[in-house]
Image (tube, helix red, strand yellow):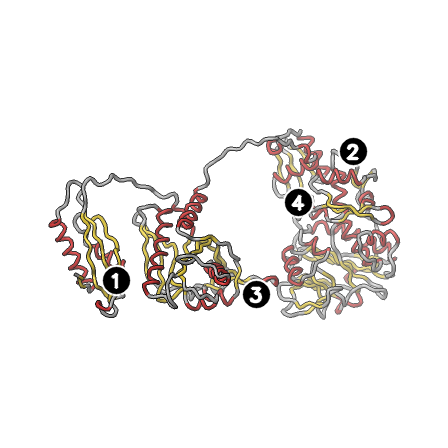
C-alpha cells in the first residue's frame, strides 16, 4: 500500500511526522515499510506492508490513526478527521432515480445520491497532485474525487451519468447467463449467474465491487451525477475478479471487507468534495437498500489474561487508554474487566479477546515484548497418529515401496475411469487448471501418472517398481453438492514377468505379494491377532480389472472393519496412462488403521512339546477360493489343531482344464505331551471327507 507522507500529515496535529518516525511507528505496530520513492514537490511515497486482515489501513486516514495512537512516538499527536459541512440541498432524489437491491445477502448496503448542475472539467491542483502522486492519471474533477476517497478513507465508490441510465433506475441483481458488461477499461466480459451487476433498465452498467461500466461513465457533457457507495460480499468480488482477470483498487479493498456502517460518513465526505470541485448541488435524500446494519460488538478483556499472554505487566487504565486511542470505546467495569466496543472499520479483524490483546501490544510497541536468548523446550512422545503413520511408511519402505507426492488434480477423462458408483467427480471453476479441473477420485491416478514418468525415463528395478502415496481422494454424491474427501494409502506394484506377456502365475504371484504387503500393514497397526479377510468382489470403478479384484477387511476381537480394496489394474486404466507395464494396485482407508494403533501385543509361552504338521493337496475347481478351504477347516474344530496355512498352488495338464491343486498345511499340538501320528490321522481324514463333500475336492497323492 502506497502512502503519501504529506497526505498523512493532513490528518495529524501537529502535522510533522517524518519518514524516519513513520517507519519506526508503523514497524512497531506490525506494518513494516517495504520501500520509499520520491513524490511530487518533495513529497515521499511510502510503501507499507498491509496484511489481509488490516483493510482499515488501505486508506491514509487508517494509517494516520495508527500514528496518532502510538504511545511510543516522539511526541503525542491527535487524529484530525475531515470535517463534514452542511450543504444546500436541491429537489428530492426520489423524483429522478429509483433503486432496487435484489441481493442484500451479496450487497449488504447500497446507497445512491444525486448531484445536479455539475460542471465536469479538470481537477483543482491539490486534487490532481494527490491523484498523480500515486501514478494515477487525472481524468476529471468528478472521477478524481472518487479515486481520492478510495485512497483517503479506503471506501471505493463510483459515479454514473444520470442521463445515460435507462429508466432512471439502478438495479442490483445477479447477472444472467452469458450477459455481457462493457467495462471502463477492461473491455467486454461475458458473465454468469454467480456475478453481481448494477444495472439500469437495459442492462449492466457496473460490475459490482470490481469495475465500473463504460456506457454510463461521466464525461465533459455530464450535468447530473449519480454517486454510489456500497459494500459487497468479499467472496463474490474475489471470485468474479479472478475469473475475469480484472484487478482494481476497489476490488482489492472489497475483498478484505468493508463494514456498511462506514459508508455514510465516507459518502458524505465524497459528495461534499464533488459539490466543491464541480459547483453542483446535492439532491435531498439518500436511496439506501440492503440488509439491516450490524450492531456494535462488545468484547471483554481481562487484564490478567493480557499480562499472562504478553509476559509484561500493563495497568488496566493504560490498556483502556491505548485501546481508546485506536478508537475502541473502552470502559472498566466493577470487576476490573475492560469492556471494549469494536469500531466498524475493525469489525472484520477483531472478534475475540486475544485480538484485543494484540491491539494493546501494538499500541505499546511490539518492541516491548522481551526476547529470551534461550527457550525452554520439553520433548514429548509423538502423537499416536504420527507414530501410526511412521510405522506404516516404514513398513512399506522395508517392503521396497517408494513414496510419491503427486497432484490432487486430474482430467475428467482420467477421473471417470476411477469414478465410484453413486458419486460424481468434484470439479473446480478455475481457469488456471483448464486441462485438469477435476479433483482425483482415487490416489491411484497419481501413482499411474508417476509410473508413466518412470516408464518414459526407462527407469526399472529388479522385481519391478513399487510406489505408494498417502493423500486424499475426493468425491461428490450424485446429483448433489455434498462433497467429501478421504485420506487413503494407495499402492502400486509392477507385475514381474519374462517374455512379452505375463503368465497367469506371474499375475497370481504379484497379487499374493500385494496381499502380503497389506497383511504387513494390518499387523503393524491392528496387531498380530488381527486377521485380514480378502473377499473377491466386482470393483466400484473401471480402474480395476472386473475379474481380479477384492475387498479388504480386518477381523479383530470378533469385529470386522472394511479398510479398502485391491486388484489388477484394468487395461482401460493402463491404456489411458499409456502404460506398457501391467500392475496390481491397492487403496486402503487410513482412518481405521490410525484408530487401531498402537497394536495390542500378546506374549505366549513357547510350546513345551513338539507338534505335527500334515500337508494335504486338494484338487479343486479353479473357482474355489482359499478362504473357502480355510473356512472348511475351521468349521470342523479339529481336535488339537492349532492352525492352517497355504503351502502352494499347482496347475498342470495332468490335473485337467479348470483344475488346480491347493496344498494345505494343518498344524497339531498338545500342550501337555508329545502327539502321536495315529492321533492326528483321524483329523486329517475328517478334513479330507469334508473337503470332498463341500468343495468337490479330490485328494492328490
Q: Contact, CB < 8 Å: mark 4 with mark 3?
A: no
Residue 111: give x, y in percent of width and height.
Answer: 73, 57
What residue did someone put label 1 on?
A: 650
What residue did someone put label 3 on?
A: 435
Q: Residues within 10 Å of mark 4 (few under 14, many from 20)?
A: few
Mark 4: which secondary structure? loop
Residue 485: give x, y in percent of width and height.
Answer: 48, 56
Q: Report the residue at 50% width, 54% height from top.
A: 405
Closer to the chain start, of discs 3 and 2, is 2
Give the alpha-carbon distance from disc 4 to disc 1, as whole Å: 81 Å
Closer to the chain start, of discs 1 and 3, is 3
* Image quarter in which the C terminus is found: bottom left
Closer to the chain start, of discs 2 and 4, is 2
Q: Residues within 10 Å of mark 1 (few under 14, many from 20)?
A: few
Q: Contact, CB < 8 Å: mark 4 with mark 1?
A: no
Q: Contact, CB < 8 Å: mark 1 with mark 2?
A: no
Q: Residues within 10 Å of mark 3 (few under 14, many from 20)?
A: few
Is label 4 or label 1 in front?
A: 1
Q: Report the residue at 63% width, 56% height from top.
A: 235
Q: In the displayed image of the protein, which residue is found farthest to the left?
A: 678
Q: Report the residue at 43% width, 51% height from top.
A: 590
Q: Quadrant of residue 227?
A: bottom right
Q: Report the residue at 82% width, 53% height from top.
A: 131
What residue did someone put label 4 on?
A: 296
Q: Which mark is residue 74?
A: 2
Q: Nearer the viewer, residue 260 or 123?
A: 123
Judge whether 8 appears above or below 513 on screen: above
Is label 1 or label 3 in front?
A: 1
Amino acid at each position: 500500500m502506497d502512502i503519501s507522507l504529506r497526505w498523512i500529515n493532513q490528518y495529524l496535529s501537529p502535522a510533522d511526522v517524518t519518514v524516519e518516525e513513520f517507519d519506526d511507528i508503523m514497524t512497531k505496530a506490525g506494518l513494516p515499510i517495504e520501500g520509499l520513492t520520491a513524490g511530487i514537490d518533495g513529497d515521499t511515497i511510502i510503501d507499507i506492508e498491509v496484511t489481509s486482515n488490516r483493510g482499515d489501513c488501505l486508506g491514509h486516514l487508517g494509517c494516520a490513526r495508527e500514528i496518532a495512537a502510538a504511545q511510543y512516538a516522539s511526541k503525542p499527536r491527535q487524529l484530525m478527521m475531515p470535517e463534514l459541512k452542511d450543504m444546500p440541498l436541491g429537489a428530492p432524489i426520489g423524483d429522478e432515480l429509483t433503486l432496487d437491491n435484489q441481493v442484500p445477502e451479496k450487497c449488504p448496503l447500497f446507497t445512491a445520491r444525486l448531484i445536479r448542475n455539475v460542471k465536469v472539467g479538470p481537477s483543482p491542483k491539490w486534487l490532481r497532485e494527490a491523484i498523480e502522486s500515486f501514478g494515477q492519471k487525472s481524468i476529471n474533477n468528478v472521477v478524481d474525487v472518487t479515486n481520492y476517497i478510495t485512497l483517503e478513507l479506503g471506501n471505493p465508490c463510483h459515479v454514473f451519468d444520470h442521463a445515460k441510465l435507462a429508466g432512471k433506475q439502478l438495479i442490483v441483481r445477479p447477472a444472467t447467463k452469458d450477459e455481457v458488461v462493457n467495462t471502463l477499461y477492461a473491455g467486454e466480459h461475458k458473465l454468469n449467474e454467480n456475478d453481481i451487476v448494477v444495472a439500469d433498465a437495459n442492462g449492466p452498467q457496473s460490475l459490482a465491487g470490481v469495475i465500473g461500466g463504460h456506457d454510463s461513465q461521466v464525461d465533459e457533457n455530464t450535468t447530473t451525477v449519480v454517486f454510489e457507495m456500497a459494500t459487497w460480499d468479499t467472496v463474490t468480488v474475489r471470485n468474479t475478479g479472478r475469473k475475469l482477470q480484472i484487478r482494481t483498487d476497489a476490488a482489492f479493498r472489497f475483498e478484505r471487507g468493508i463494514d456498511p456502517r462506514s459508508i455514510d460518513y465516507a459518502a458524505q465526505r465524497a459528495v461534499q468534495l464533488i459539490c466543491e470541485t464541480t459547483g453542483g448541488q446535492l439532491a435531498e435524500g439518500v436511496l439506501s437498500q440492503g440488509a439491516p446494519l450490524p450492531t456494535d460488538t462488545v468484547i471483554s478483556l481481562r487484564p490478567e489474561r493480557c499480562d499472562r499472554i504478553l509476559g509484561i505487566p500493563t495497568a488496566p487504565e493504560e490498556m483502556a487508554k491505548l485501546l481508546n486511542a485506536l478508537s475502541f470505546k473502552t470502559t472498566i467495569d466493577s470487576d476490573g474487566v475492560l469492556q471494549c466496543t469494536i469500531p466498524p472499520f475493525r469489525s472484520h479483524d477483531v472478534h475475540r479477546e486475544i485480538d484485543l490483546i494484540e491491539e494493546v501490544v501494538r499500541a505499546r510497541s511490539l518492541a516491548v515484548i522481551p526476547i529470551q536468548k534461550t527457550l525452554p523446550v520439553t520433548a514429548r512422545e509423538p502423537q499416536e497418529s504420527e507414530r501410526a503413520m511412521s510405522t506404516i511408511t516404514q513398513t512399506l519402505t522395508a517392503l521396497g515401496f517408494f513414496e510419491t507426492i503427486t497432484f490432487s488434480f486430474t482430467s475428467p477423462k482420467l477421473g471417470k475411469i476411477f469414478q465410484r458408483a453413486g458419486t460424481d467427480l468434484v470439479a473446480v471453476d478455475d481457469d488456471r487448471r483448464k486441462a485438469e479441473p477435476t479433483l482425483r477420485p482415487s490416489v491411484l491416478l497419481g501413482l499411474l501418472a508417476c509410473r508413466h514418468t518412470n516408464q518414459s525415463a526407462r527407469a526399472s528395478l529388479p522385481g519391478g517398481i513399487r510406489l505408494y502415496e498417502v493423500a486424499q481422494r475426493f468425491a461428490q454424491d450424485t446429483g448433489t453438492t455434498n462433497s467429501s474427501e478421504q485420506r487413503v494409502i494407495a499402492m502400486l506394484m509392477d507385475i514381474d514377468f519374462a517374455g512379452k506377456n505375463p503368465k497367469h502365475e506371474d499375475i497370481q504371484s504379484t497379487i499374493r505379494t500385494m496381499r502380503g504387503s497389506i497383511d504387513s500393514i494390518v499387523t503393524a497397526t491392528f496387531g498380530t491377532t488381527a486377521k485380514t479377510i480378502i473377499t473377491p468382489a466386482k470393483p466400484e470403478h473401471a480402474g480395476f480389472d472386473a475379474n481380479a479384484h477384492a475387498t479388504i477387511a480386518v477381523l479383530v476381537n470378533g469385529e470386522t472393519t472394511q479398510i479398502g480394496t485391491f486388484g489388477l489394474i484394468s487395461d482401460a486404466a493402463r491404456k489411458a496412462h499409456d502404460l506398457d507395464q501391467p500392475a496390481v494396485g491397492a487403496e486402503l482407508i487410513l482412518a481405521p488403521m490410525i484408530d487401531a494403533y498402537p497394536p495390542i501385543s500378546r506374549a505366549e509361552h513357547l510350546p513345551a512339546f513338539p507338534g505335527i504338521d500334515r500337508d494335504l493337496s486338494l484338487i479343486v475347481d479353479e473357482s474355489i477360493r482359499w478362504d473357502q478351504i480355510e473356512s472348511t477347516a475351521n468349521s470342523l474344530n479339529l481336535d488339537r489343531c492349532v492352525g492352517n496355512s497355504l503351502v502352494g498352488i499347482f496347475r498342470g495338464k495332468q490335473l485337467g482344464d479348470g483344475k488346480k491343486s491347493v496344498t494345505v498345511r494343518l498344524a497339531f499340538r498338545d500342550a501337555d505331551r508329545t502327539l502321536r501320528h495315529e492321533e492326528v490321522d483321524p483329523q486329517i481324514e475328517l478334513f479330507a471327507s469334508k473337503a470332498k463333500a463341500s468343495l468337490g475336492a479330490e485328494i492328490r497323492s
